[in-house]
Amino acid sequence: MDGVHRFVLLGAVEAGKTTLFNALTGKRELALKTQAMDYDQEIVDTPGEFFSHPRLYHALIGAAAEADTLMYVHACDDRECRLPPGLLDVNAGKRVIGVITKIDLPEADPDAAERLLRDHGFDGEVFRVSARRPETIASLKTQLYGLEERRTS
Ligand SMILES: Nc1nc2c(ncn2[C@@H]2O[C@H](COP(=O)(O)OP(=O)(O)OP(=O)(O)O)[C@@H](O)[C@H]2O)c(=O)[nH]1
Ligand SMILES: [Mg+2]
């Protein structure tokens, strides 16, 4: 490995991956529907379809293979967790973190969203963010870089 720390964002269509990607990489534009893998600053954004259709898993697994942190993105108004059983296990040994998005929504229930993830066997660290609350993104960033410092020290 070249020592570069890579994150891959994965999760269902509309989960908020690209919005998070833009926020983490400092882009101010609105997220358009993701059609293909997108790379910037060591972060890989993936289309939700790759996650939702088993015949496209290979694309996701390829991207994940090159990353060392998998970020599973889940919108807190999404009552269904489509985390494919075993998909994350393929990447055993990698850091897997959960990011619950859209916590600004009036109907947001981040506790319920986190329970849903746990019920699906997700046991990584879980963070809660809103693209409309810059402090939540800043705090996630600190965690990501803090994790990296601990990893490399
Ligand atoms: N209220 C609110 N809306 C958000 C937030 N994050 C994303 N959205 C909205 O959710 C919708 C989907 O966001 P995207 O970032 O495009 O979702 P995605 O996961 O990249 O979707 P695909 O590219 O189709 O896989 C957009 O209309 C965003 O504006 C958030 O924190 N709060
Ligand atoms: Mg997208």
Image: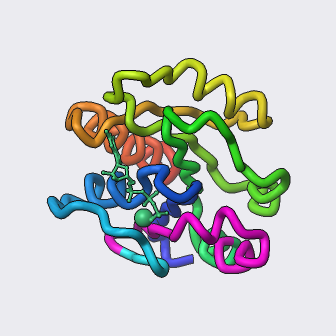
Residue 55 rendering spot, x and y as whole percentages: 77, 77
Residue pictured at 50% horizontal, 33% vertical: 76
Left or right: residue 109 versus residue 145 is: right
Residue pictured at 65% horizontal, 64% vertical: 51
Question: In the rendered image, which quarter is residue 143 located in?
Answer: top left
Left or right: residue 76 versus residue 140 is: right
Question: In the rendered image, which quarter is residue 94 located in?
Answer: bottom right
Q: Is residue 119 magenta?
A: no
Residue 122 position (above or below residue 4): above
Which residue of the protein is positioned furthest toward the left in this rendering? 28
Question: In the rendered image, which quarter is residue 91 located in?
Answer: bottom right
Q: How is the image coloured?
A: rainbow
Residue 115 rendering spot, x and y as whole percentages: 67, 23
Magenta-colored span: 40-60
From the viewer's side, name the closer residue of 94 and 111.
Answer: 111
Residue 61 rendering spot, x and y as whole percentages: 70, 72
Tell me the quadrant of the picture where the N terminus can be found. Answer: bottom right
Residue 11 rendering spot, x and y as whole percentages: 58, 55
Residue pictured at 39% horizontal, 41% vertical: 146
Quadrant of the image where one finds ligand 2: bottom left
Q: Is residue 46 magenta?
A: yes
Residue pictured at 48% horizontal, 81% vertical: 36
Which residue of the protein is positioned furthest toward the front in this rendering? 107
From the viewer's side, name the closer residue of 77 and 5.
Answer: 77
